Image (cartoon, grey):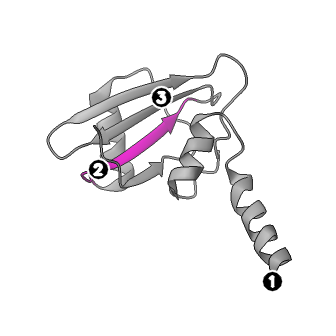
Amino acid sequence: MLRIEAIWLAVGSSDLRGGMDSLLGLVIARFGSAQPHHAYVFANRRATRLKVLVYDGAGIWLCTRRLQEGRFAWPQDDRGDLHLSEQQWNWLAAGLPWQRMSAHAIAGAIAVV
């Protein structure tokens, strides 16, 4: 079983036509190096396909997810990289608007207080 401690989005679009080695090059270019038990997520220009690169400390795993309809809620702003919580990742991978999660959580917290 893969252990993933952190999930990073390479915001903006990436060329996903290459394989594992080209994505590893993107990880090194964007993040400096691949950290053990971290997942690095890339999306194509239309945000209909994701590729996830996971370094488990001994080797690299490559996973792909493609939506049959619609698009992933993928940030197109190239200003930086994002770190996601597990719940945010679950929403993103399901094609749901994960950016709205924190807004709902904050609104709920304000309403309770």
Mark carried by residue 15: 3
Residue at figure coordinates x 26%, y 43% from the top left: 55
Residue at figure coordinates x 64%, y 41% from the top left: 74
Residue 17 among magenta residues: no
Rounded to the nearest angstrom, the CA distance separating label 1 from label 3 is: 46 Å
**Which amino acid type is marked by label 1?**
Val
Which stretch appears magenta? Answer: 33-44
In the rendered structure, are the residues bearing label 2 and label 3 in contact, judged by CB atoms less than 8 Å apart? Answer: no
Q: Residue 17 falls in which quadrant of the image?
A: top left
Residue labelled with disc 2: 37
Task: Report x, y in % for residue 18.
Answer: 37, 22
Task: Report x, y in % for residue 97.
Answer: 72, 44
Residue labelled with disc 1: 113
Residue at figure coordinates x 62%, y 25% from the top left: 48
* In this view, the mark in front (1 or 2): 1
View extreme (left): residue: 58
* In this view, the mark in front (2 or 3): 2
**Which amino acid type is marked by label 3?**
Asp
Q: Nearer the viewer, residue 70 or 42?
A: 70
| Left or right position of 5 against 102 | left
